[in-house]
Image: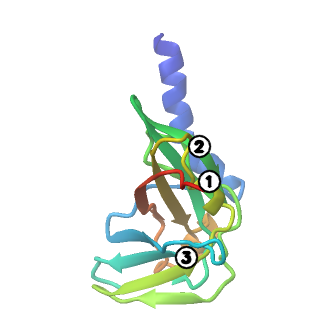
Amino acid sequence: MRLPLALLGVLLCALPAMAQGSGHGVAVLCEQTSALLDVSASTRAEPREYTVSVTNHSSRAILVPRTPIFGWRIESEEAHGWRLRAEGGPVRRIHAKDEHIAVTGETQDGSELVEIAPSATYRWKSSLPQVDPLLLPASEESTTLKLTLFWAASPGLARSNRAVPPCALAPEWTVTVQKQAR
């Protein structure tokens, strides 16, 4: 039993190095910023709008892309905790109980960067049409869902500019939905 645990430990330690070599990266959650997720109500005519507010709590300015591409994860609450319903995008949690975030694709690093001054807040607005249909109840009863959006800079962008945070953002939104009567 000790050998598999030791191999798992070596693999987890090697993940950042392997990811950087392949153009992908692994990041921990940011400690010097906070991120909140706000979701607008939707109608059949208009999709939801997702707003991520990022506040810089550090003593220096940070840079983030003006138009990032978010990863996302939807989980439903069950008696024994949260169960994955769906996920997508270029940034994902490595494992449901692991705080590490993996960059697995393009996160829009070529876009214009925006500076967030110390104690300031910047708001991204985004639509995620692939997420909207998944925020429906699983049964006739109410369902509690948790939506998490993820963003982390690619290793190349984080290395090329010290003002880009090398950590990840993961704001969450929890909602209880009911099937609507027709």
Residue 82 appears in which quarter of the rendering? top left
> Residue flagged by tag 2: what amino acid is it?
Arg
> From what the image shows, is residue 144 above or below residue 38?
above
Q: Which residue is mark 3?
A: 49
Q: What distance separates the C-alpha of mark 2 from that of mark 1?
A: 8 Å
Q: Position of residue 116 (x, y in %)?
A: 41, 87
The residue shown at (32%, 87%) is 120
> From what the image shows, is residue 15 above or below residue 7?
below
Q: Position of residue 100 (x, y in %)?
A: 48, 49
Q: Which residue is mark 1?
A: 134
Q: Residues within 10 Å of mark 2 (few under 14, many from 20)?
A: some
The residue shown at (56%, 34%) is 11
Q: Quadrant of the C terminus?
A: bottom right
Cβ–Cβ under 8 Å for marks 2 and 1:
yes
> Residue flagged by tag 1: what amino acid is it?
Leu
Q: What distance separates the C-alpha of mark 2 from that of mark 3?
A: 20 Å
Q: Nearer the viewer, mark 2 or mark 1?
A: 1
